[in-house]
Amino acid sequence: HFQNQIIPKRCSLSETLLENRIAGLSENFEMACISGVWTADTAMESIL
């Protein structure tokens, strides 16, 4: 994924991997809409 190549990795131990990724995207893209699959969990994916 494009964003994985340009956004520094975050590693906050108090957050899940997904939370770290979303926080990293938010810090760099602000209100951008990034399409695609976010999680393998179909229930969570439908929420996102």
Image (cartoon, rainbow, N blue to C red):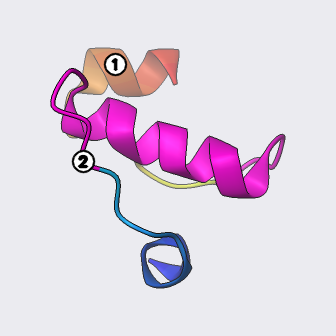
Of callouts 2 and 1, which one flags the residue occurring earlier in the amino acid sequence?
A: 2
Q: Check disc 1 and report its element: helix, strand or loop.
A: helix
The disc label shown at residue 11, or none:
2
> Residue at left 20%, top 21%?
14
**Label 2 neighbourhood size at 10 Å, few (<14), some (14-19), many (20+)?**
few
- Residue marked by disc 1: 44
Q: Which residues make up the magenta segment?
A: 11-34
Q: Check disc 2 and report its element: helix, strand or loop.
A: loop
Expressed as whole percent of the image width and height from the top left, the position of residue 34 reads: 66, 54
In this view, the residue in front, 6 or 36, is: 6
Q: What's the residue type where badge 1 is placed? A: Met
Count of labels shown? 2
Expressed as whole percent of the image width and height from the top left, the position of residue 11 reads: 24, 47
> Residue at left 51%, top 55%?
36
> Residue at left 35%, top 40%?
20
Query: Residues under labels 2 and 1: Cα distance?
Result: 22 Å
Up-down relation of residue 25 to residue 20 (above or below)? below
Up-down relation of residue 13 to residue 20 (above or below)? above
Quadrant in which the N terminus is drawn: bottom left
Residue 44 shown in magenta: no
Q: Outermost residue toward the right?
A: 31
